[in-house]
Amino acid sequence: MGQLEDKVNAYKELGSRIEELTAQKKKLTQEILELIPKEEDIIDISQYRVKRMVLFSIKTSLETARTFGAVKMEEIVDKKEIKKLLAQGVFIPDVTETHFIQVSKSKKALAEDGENDERDVK
C-alpha cells in the first residue's frame, strides 16, 4: 500500500496547491479588472492582449422568464435514457466514458483531526 498511499498523499497535496493558486489567480483577475480603464474592453500590454469578458449565471425560474417572453421550446438529449441504454450494452456514438478518482479524508482521520473534509473531484 506504500506506493498507493504516496500517490494519494501527492494527489491531495496538489489539490491544496491548486486551491491556493486558484485563489491567487482570482485575486489577480480582480486587480487586473480594476486597472483596465472602464471604457476599454480590450487592452494590449507588451505581448499580451487582455479582454474584459462578461459571463452571466442565469438561474431565473421558468415562470419569471415567461413574464419577460424569454422562453423557448427545444429538444434535448435525454441523458438518463442514454445511460440506461449504455447499461444495457447498447453502443451509442459520440458518448465517452471518463474515469476519475475522488479522494477525501477517512472518517478515522477526520475524527483524529476534528475536521470536515470537502470532497475533491478529478
Image (cartoon, rainbow, N blue to C red):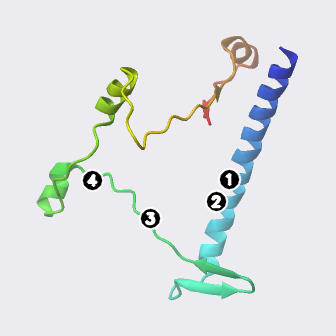
Indicate which disc, 1 or 3, sits on the residue closer to the N terminus. Answer: 1
Indicate which disc, 3 or 2, sits on the residue closer to the N terminus. Answer: 2
Comparing labels 3 and 4, the label whose residue is closer to the camera? 3
Q: Are marks 1 and 2 in contact (CB under 8 Å)?
A: yes
In 3D space, how far apart are the residues under numbered discs 2 and 4 (Cα atoms)?
26 Å
Tell me the tag on residue 60.
4
- Residue 93 in percent (x, y) is at 40, 41
- In the image, is residue 80 above or below residue 87? below
Instruction: Specify the amino acid type for callout 2.
Output: Lys
- Give the residue at mark 3: 55
Q: Residue furthest top?
A: 108
In 3D space, how far apart are the residues under numbered discs 3 and 4 (Cα atoms)?
15 Å
In 3D space, how far apart are the residues under numbered discs 1 and 2 (Cα atoms)?
6 Å
Instruction: Specify the amino acid type for callout 4.
Output: Thr
Indicate which disc, 3 or 4, sits on the residue closer to the N terminus. Answer: 3
Instruction: Name the side, left or right, on which 48 lies relative to 71.
Output: right
Tell me the tag on residue 22.
1
- Residue 108 in percent (x, y) is at 71, 11
- Residue 36 in percent (x, y) is at 61, 82
Residue drawn at x 29%, y 30% as measured from the top left: 81
Instruction: Name the side, left or right, on which 75 lies relative to 48.
Output: left
- The quadrant in which residue 112 appears is top right
In 3D space, how far apart are the residues under numbered discs 1 and 4 (Cα atoms)?
28 Å
Instruction: Specify the amino acid type for callout 3.
Output: Leu
- Give the residue at mark 2: 26
Q: Nearer the viewer, residue 74 or 91?
A: 91
Residue drawn at x 66%, y 13% as measured from the top left: 107
